[in-house]
Amino acid sequence: MEQKSILVTGGAGYIGSHTVLQLLLGGYRAVIVDNLDNSSQIAVERVQKLAGEYGPNLSFHQIDLRDKPALEQLFVTTKFEAVIHFAGLKAVGESVQKPLMYYDNNLIGTIVLLEVMAAHGCKKLVFSSSATVYGWPKEVPCTEEFPLSATNPYGRTKLFIEEICRDIYQSDSEWKIILLRYFNPVGAHPSGDIGEDPRGIPNNLMPFVQQVAVGRRPALTVFGTDYSTADGTGVRDYIHVVDLADGHISALNKLSDPSVGCEVYNLGTGKGTSVLEMVAAFEKASGKKIPLVLAGRRPGDAEVVYASTDKAAHELTWKAKYGIDEMCRDQWNWASKNPYGYESPDSTA
Ligand code: NAD
Ligand code: WQD
């Protein structure tokens, strides 16, 4: 049987690299398009190595999605079964400072991709949306039917792209689109060879905790201790990145179901964990003490967010397998092997 080729935009990044590995192990060919704006080619090399005998089924192209002729050329030479579209900028604070940069990169990049896909008759797409589209939810767990809102330009790009996808499906029912709303991806591949390697000061909780643990930062600032939660800190639905990656394989399989049009699924665990609970789990996994500075709330933060997982469980037959102990174990394994991310001396050699 001929192997199916999947185009993975943003495949050198955190979630993309883990998904590409699962694709290769699942027998797919994977073609990565990434401009390396927030990633390293070393991640691609490590994925290739981890994939063993399947490694040769991976190819990488350093292309910006907005470079239409370059993307066209790729579609001329390869027939893609589907596209998994991760590429985008994702820092909430930066999006407030530089909204046009976010609209240009995320929206124009996506529009160019969709145009080229349509022109080449590739109309199957899995898109990285985000729980950020639930804003500050009035109740939990968040179901896919909840009202949508955005509190910053980054979130608005996710909302707009979801709407664009619904519109193109309305205009042409040959499209099959799955919008995946991720909750809070954390952890790393159990090998410790690939993981999250943010540039600059991490925005998100676990990359920050990890950098404190390896001595790169003195303390974690806890944003808000007066929420109406058991310990006063914010509650989120943390999901192991390998579970998340597997969710994409399930979504890809679902695209072959004739009943699929433009569908949306939450990818989360359905469990809420507070900041302090997460820190305690990481301390247990790493044996490191994480000094804390208790501070006020971060503007725009919701109090409690976690997913309803029923729809993904029933329709994608996918469920997260890992809990926070495994997330922290694998995060620490990655951090201790690569304290400076992909710039660390090569621990895999
Ligand atoms: P990441 O930054 O590690 O990966 C994104 C990749 O896209 C990077 O490798 C970057 O170089 C590439 N890229 C960006 N703009 C590009 C362009 N114009 N052309 C080509 N490549 C481009 O981020 P991630 O955490 O892996 O997130 C992947 C996707 O999932 C993003 O769309 C993000 O918004 C979404 N998401 C992430 C989270 C999270 O917490 N990590 C949560 C929800 C949704
Ligand atoms: C988690 C909890 C913080 C950092 C963001 C984006 C969202 C999505 C995922 C892409 C909160 C607290 C954090 C720190 C802290 N990304 N915290 N000290 O805010 O749920 O979601 O990432 O789509 O769009 O908004 O994740 O990891 O930033 O925060 O106390 O240094 O940790 O207040 O309660 P968040 P996060």
Image (tube, rainbow, N blue to C red):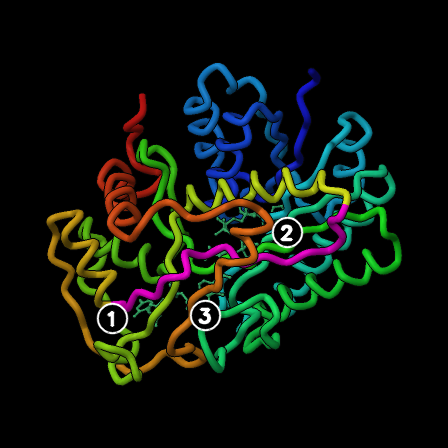
Image position of 271 (left or right of 332): right
Residue 152, by quadrant, is: bottom right
Q: Quadrant of residue 83?
A: top right
What numbered label is drawn on residue 141?
Answer: 3
Q: Marks 3 and 1: in contact by CB < 8 Å? A: no
Of residues 169 and 117, which is closer to you in this image?
Answer: 169
Tag 2's secondary structure? strand
Q: Nearer the N terminus, badge 1 or badge 3?
A: 3
Answer whether labels 2 and 3 touch (C-beta < 8 Å): no
Queried whether the magenta region covers residue 261, the answer comes back as yes
Q: Earlier in the sequence, mark 2 or mark 3?
A: 2
Residue 283: percent from left, percent from top: 15, 54
Q: Give the range drawn in magenta.
A: 259-275
Give the number of the mark in front: 1 or 3: 3
Q: Mark 2 points at which residue?
A: 127
- Binning the other alpha carbons within 10 Å of mark 2 as few (below 14), some (14 to 19) or many (20 upward) gives many
Q: Quadrant of the N terminus?
A: top right
Residue at (28%, 28%) from the top-left corner? Answer: 347
| Residue at the image point whose x is 52% and y is 59% from the top | 90
Q: How far apart are marks 1 and 3 (CA)?
A: 27 Å
The question of residue 193 being in magenta is answered with no
Q: Is residue 177 above or below residue 166?
A: above
The numbered disc on residue 221 is 1
Expressed as whole percent of the image width and height from the top left, the position of residue 107 reads 70, 60
Could you tell which of marks 1 and 2 lies nearer the N-terminus? 2
Q: Where is residue 214 in the image (x, y as percent from the top left)?
A: 19, 49
Q: In which quarter of the image is the C terminus?
A: top left
Kindly report the distance in space between the C-alpha atoms of the residues bearing marks 2 and 3.
22 Å
Cβ at disc 1 under 8 Å from ligand 2: yes
- Horizontally, residue 301 falls left or right of residue 176, namely left
